[in-house]
Amino acid sequence: MSAILVAVVLAFLNQIVKPILTILTIPITIVTLGLFLLAINAFIILFAEKLVSGFHVAGFWYALLFSLILSLITGVLNSLFGVREIKKDEG
């Protein structure tokens, strides 16, 4: 049950908090060539840890590793099952 709650909280935080943090940190994201987005993901994971009891992350580096793995899995799943645009025949 805790895993489902973590997934829901992470989805909510990714939809609400992550865009705000991304906009606020555009300069550092540009300087780091986008790698700072992994740090933003790690902070969101640490924030989810505070909100969900039963979910524990040992520290920032483990949250960063979790973020990296989550980003890779999400990218693979989006490439396999992502929404594809259907092209209409022009007649």
Image: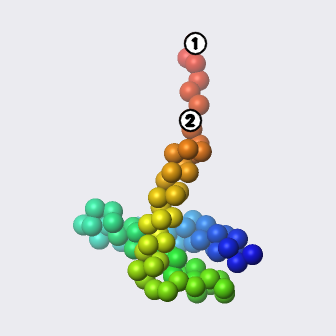
- The image quadrant of residue 29 is bottom left
**In this orientation, which residue lies closer to the viewer: 2 or 18?**
2
Q: Residue 72: which disc?
A: none
Label 2 sits on what residue type? Glu
| Residue 89 falls left or right of residue 62 | right
Q: Check disc 1 and report the residue beneath it.
A: 91
For disc 1, the neighbor class at 10 Å (few under 14, some 14 to 19, many from 20) is: few
Q: Residue at x 35, y 70 (%)?
A: 36
For disc 2, the neighbor class at 10 Å (few under 14, some 14 to 19, many from 20) is: few
Q: Residue at x 47, y 61 (%)?
A: 71
Percent across and percent down for residue 61 are 41, 80
Q: Residue at x 28, y 62 (%)?
A: 33
The correct choice, above or below, for 75 with respect to 6 in the image is above
Q: Residue 85: which disc?
A: 2
- Element class at badge 1: loop
**In this orientation, which residue lies closer to the viewer: 70 or 33?**
70
- Element class at badge 2: loop
User: In terms of sequence position, does the residue under pointer 1 or pointer 2 come before the other?
Assistant: 2
Quadrant assignment for the C terminus: top right
Q: How is the image coloured?
A: rainbow
Label 1 sits on what residue type? Gly
Percent across and percent down for residue 17 are 53, 72
| Residue 55 falls left or right of residue 22 | right
**Seen from this angle, which residue lies furthest left?**
31
Does the residue at mark 1 contact the one at mark 2 (Cβ under 8 Å)?
no
Give the mark count: 2
Percent across and percent down for residue 74 are 53, 57
Q: Nearer the viewer, mark 1 or mark 2?
A: 2
**In this orientation, which residue lies closer to the viewer: 43 or 21?**
43
**In this orientation, which residue lies closer to the viewer: 17 or 68?**
68
- Residue 41 in view, yes or no: no
